[in-house]
Amino acid sequence: MDKTDKLIKSGTDLIMKDLDTMSEKLKNLIEEINADYENGKLLISEEQWYHIIILVGAITQHDAERISEQVSELESKGHITGKLRELIDLAIKFRNLDFE
């Protein structure tokens, strides 16, 4: 393996590590949001749940346009804090990944 191949491999490995970290954080955030909702610590309307579900689907499909739409929908309903803010921030990071 020459230097160029090693450089490409190390860059790819770094990107994959970051992607794995972001994916794990997404999984954990979804579990925490659900647990907080079930424990009554988080009040989310049916409409917000709908947008969260669509947002997570858009993230898993890396659909940048739908991510932007759902983030805008969630943010248009008022001030977002806590775990939901973390989810939106993570969604924006996923949206900004360029796989082309």
Image (tube, rainbow, N blue to C red):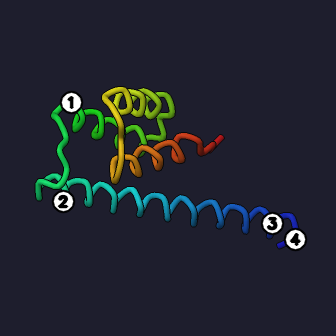
Q: Give whichever of discs 3 and 1 has the lower sequence position.
A: 3
Q: Residue at x 51, y 33 (%)?
A: 64
Residue at the far right: name it. 3
Q: Give whichever of discs 4 and 2 has the lower sequence position.
A: 4
Q: Of helix, strand and loop, which one carries label 4? A: loop
Q: Nearer the viewer, mark 3 or mark 1?
A: 1
Residue underneath mark 1: 47
For badge 4, the amino acid type reads: Asp
**How far apart are the alpha carbons under marks 3 and 1?**
46 Å
Residue 63: percent from left, percent from top: 47, 34
Q: Give whichever of discs 2 and 3 has the lower sequence position.
A: 3
**How far apart are the alpha carbons under marks 4 and 2?**
49 Å
Residue underneath mark 3: 7
For badge 1, the amino acid type reads: Glu
**How far apart are the alpha carbons under marks 2 and 1?**
18 Å
Residue underneath mark 2: 35
